[in-house]
Amino acid sequence: MVISESLRNPIIETERLIMKPITMHYRDEIFKEFTPEITVHMCPQPTGDIKDTEKFINESIQKNEAGTNLQFVIVKKDTDEFLGNAGLHLDKEQPEFGIWIKKSAHGNGCGFEAIRGIKEWAEQNLDYDYLSYPVVKDNKSSRKIPEKLGGKNVRSFVGKTYSASHWMRWNTGFIKNKKIIRKQPIRLADWLLCYSTCTYPRSSTKKYR
């Protein structure tokens, strides 16, 4: 999916939060808060090299501008405090959510509020069959987000870890391997092998413009 220029780089507001397009302004905070503890159930994991953070931001900006991705930073509406990252990845068969919230902001419902806000924006502006939210089965706090929003677990599958030079990526029900260079080893315990996929039913018939 490629969205029209008028829909690229939106700013989405909820009761407490603002989701705005990622910029290099947040480089240091993303690097600081994207920690091994935060990414236990995620891939890729932090490498400890700020150049990788810069690469991620630059690639996200390029995809945002091209209309193939919506990558946001999440900030508090009243203080502009950085809380984490969220994305709606459009270069999939169907749009796919991704999110992480910094450790100090856990337990306040910010992840749910951010995903709900992006979901409501998508319903009003995009054309899709469903929205996907890939999540590790044992990550109960993250699973609550799509479940509270009406998501259904429609597929479960098991992946494999091969070596520290490979990572796993969920993509329309299959595990694919992509070779990358890591500056830090990955402990096998960091990978949970059972994945579930929650999908949101369509609740809007509006087309992307």
Image (tube, rainbow, N blue to C red):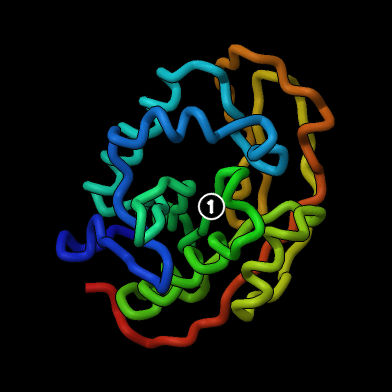
Quadrant of residue 199 within the rendered picture: bottom right
Residue 60 image point, x, y percent: 34, 40
Q: Identify which residue, 35 or 143, lies in the foreground.
A: 35
Quadrant of residue 207 within the rendered picture: bottom left
Secondary element at tag 1: strand
Q: Residue furthest front?
A: 79
Report the side of 75 relative to 168 (left or right).
Answer: left
Amino acid under label 1?
Answer: Ile
Q: Identify which residue, 6 or 14, lies in the foreground.
A: 14
Residue found 68% across the figure and 55% down from its top: 135
Residue 137 image point, x, y percent: 79, 56
| On-image quarter of the C terminus | bottom left
Is 3 drawn above or below residue 71 in the view shown? below
Residue 182 image point, x, y percent: 59, 16
Report the side of 164 relative to 7 (left or right).
Answer: right
Q: Identify which residue, 156 or 151, lies in the foreground.
A: 151
Q: Residue furthest top?
A: 183
Residue found 30% across the figure and 50% down from its top: 21
